[in-house]
Image (cartoon, rainbow, N blue to C red):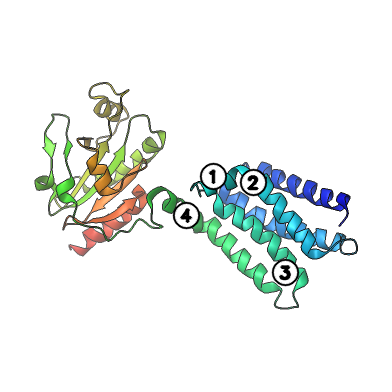
Amino acid sequence: MKFLSVLRIVILSALLLFLVAYLTRWVITYNSVIGFVAYFFLTVLLLKWMDKESRPKTVLVVMIGTRLLLGAPAVYKYLNGDLWSLPMLILHMGGIISGYLFLRVKKPVNLLPVALGSSVALFMFFSGWDYWIHRINYGTFRGLINGSNVVEQISIADRNGRIIAATDIRGKIVILEFWFTSCSACFEKFPKLQATYERYKNDPEVAIYGVNKPIEEDAPEEAFEVISAEGYSFPVAILNDDSMLQALGVTSYPTTIVLNRQGRLVYRGSIEGAVLLAEELRSDLK
């Protein structure tokens, strides 16, 4: 393949990546599905355009290489365990490979990779990204855990310094929302936590606490005051011992934990999923 032909592919691939990013404003759900479609059509067009002057496999290799090169910072993160945007790169690659196979494989078999890639792209757009981000943040795709009995590990304190321990919550469905005062993402979840508390505040079978992890910048009683100032009334408690975080597997914030009536850890993830599970557990008691 001539140098100018390679250069054309590189430039067009780069322009496409930035155009998709601009149109989707880097919103990863849109970027993934639109990127798949865009790379598919670009690959088909380039293969038809350069059919007489280049080998199809060379076009494929140059396009994949260009995409990897342009995504080098992300690839470096993947190699270091930060896999947050990996599905987006895979879908972009899938668009390129699907376009190549669409022209190089006999009909109607050539439609299979297109159908498969499109199905994956749509799945990621509608729900797959939620599962993936949940997996990255909390270690599971849906948050459901068949955990051990951890109720004895619970040790938090209310505003008066009274310790809330296993004896206070044993036999109840327990929802613990872990947060800290400078966590903006945590405050975005508080309306949902408040609504959940309003629903169950008079239910003796359910206990709900917003568990604050103190940080150095916190003033005395700041965790309680900031929640009150925001107009929330759900119970706030302070974490007594960081070993409790390790026992519950809390590594990011916000994280919602659910314990069943037997004191077993059954959920770790977002507040939305925790509420759904709590509803199921409560229904089982009726």
Q: Residue furthest top?
A: 219
Q: Earlier in the sequence, mark 3 or mark 1?
A: 1
Q: The residue under label 4 is which amino acid type?
A: Trp
Q: Circle 4 sits in a helix, a strand or a loop, which is it?
A: helix
Q: Which residue is mark 3?
A: 101
Residue linked to disc 4: 132
| Three-letter residue code for mark 3 | Leu
- The mark nearer the N terminus, 3 or 4, is 3
Q: Position of 245 compared to 149: left or right?
A: right
Indicate which label's residue lies in the foreground, 3 or 4. Answer: 3
Q: Tell me where residue 85 appears, x and y as whole percent.
A: 55, 49
Any mark on residue 71, and which?
2
| CA gap, disc 1 and disc 2 | 10 Å
Callout 2: helix, strand or loop? Answer: loop
Q: Nearer the viewer, residue 202 or 33?
A: 33
| SS at circle 3 | helix
Label 1, secondary structure: give it.
Answer: helix
